[in-house]
């Protein structure tokens, strides 16, 4: 949260991870705009992400979750990798996170089996006689589900990315709080380090976000 708030305070916009626009590492899209990289996802190997990015760069952007699962190398990009990408919002253009999580396993397995059949010389309903993907292949219809709430999104992002990128209440209130001279703890520490001892007792107003709580029962 601190890094994103600091960046925004300096006029730098951080764009979320996206399978069609992110590289393995962070990259500058244009002046003042940085795109989140997808190479640092916990539980997802860098080889899997590099394979996905290479496929996109070589053959164009992915058009749907089905299209992505058809084109990836299933020996490198696991079903868990696809799940992680969905949870951090890297496939938002294909549908809501709740919708994609409901169907991704079936799509992944179907595409994986189709590739195995094609490699073995078998023909299935999703392939033409020469082994190429049929032009009539349909995109999976997504279920009518409400999106997960922002708290769940931030929990997934924190667990997989190491940082929450979905705006929290604190992100939304930060401009107002800063206009009223409230400061984050790290700002106070930095100022204190460069302030003389005679000014170190000046009252300050701080703000922050409670991420967890421990409840202790009295004996």
Image: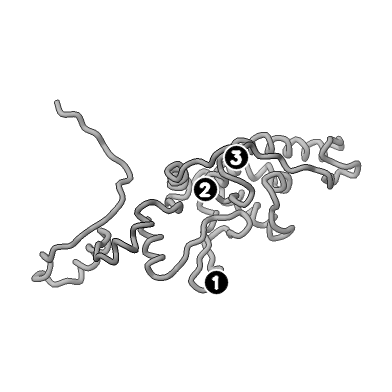
Residue lying at the far right of the rendered structure: 129
According to the image, label 2 marks what residue?
88
The answer to which quarter of the image holds residue 55 is bottom right
According to the image, label 3 marks what residue?
99
Residue lying at the far left of the rendered structure: 198
Q: Which residue is more in the foreground, 97 or 45?
A: 97
Instruction: Decide if residue 169 is on the left or right side of residue 148.
Output: left
Neighbours of disc 1 within 10 Å: few (<14), some (14-19), many (20+):
few
Neighbours of disc 2 within 10 Å: few (<14), some (14-19), many (20+):
many
According to the image, label 1 marks what residue?
30
| Above or below 62: residue 137 | above
Where does the N terminus fall, quadrant-wise?
Answer: bottom left
Q: Which residue is more in the foreground, 121 or 111?
A: 111
Where's residue 20, x and y in %? Answer: 63, 57
| Above or below 129: residue 26 | below
Please report the residue visible at 58 percent of the width from the left and 37 percent of the height from the top.
145
Q: CA distance from mark 2 to mark 3?
A: 14 Å
């Amino acid at each position: 949260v601190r890094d994103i708030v600091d960046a925004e305070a300096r006029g730098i916009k951080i764009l979320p991870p996206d399978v069609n626009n992110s590289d393995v590492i962070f990259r500058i899209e244009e002046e003042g705009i940085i795109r989140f990289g997808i190479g640092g996802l916990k539980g997802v190997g860098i080889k899997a992400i590099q394979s996905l990015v290479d496929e996109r760069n070589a053959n164009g952007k992915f058009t749907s979750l089905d299209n992505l699962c058809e084109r990836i190398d299933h020996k490198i990009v696991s079903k868990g990798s696809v799940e992680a990408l969905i949870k951090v919002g890297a496939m938002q253009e294909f549908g809501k996170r709740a919708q994609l999580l409901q169907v991704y396993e079936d799509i992944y397995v179907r595409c994986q089996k189709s590739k195995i059949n094609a490699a073995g010389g078998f023909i299935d309903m999703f392939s033409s006689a020469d082994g190429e993907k049929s032009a009539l292949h349909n995109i999976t219809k997504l279920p009518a589900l409400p999106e997960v709430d922002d708290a769940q999104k931030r929990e997934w992002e924190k667990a997989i990315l190491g940082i929450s990128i979905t705006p929290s209440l604190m992100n939304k209130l930060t401009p107002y709080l800063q206009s009223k001279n409230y400061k984050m703890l790290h700002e106070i520490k930095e100022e204190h380090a460069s302030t003389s001892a005679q000014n170190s007792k000046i009252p300050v107003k701080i703000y922050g976000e409670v991420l967890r709580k421990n409840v202790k029962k009295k004996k």
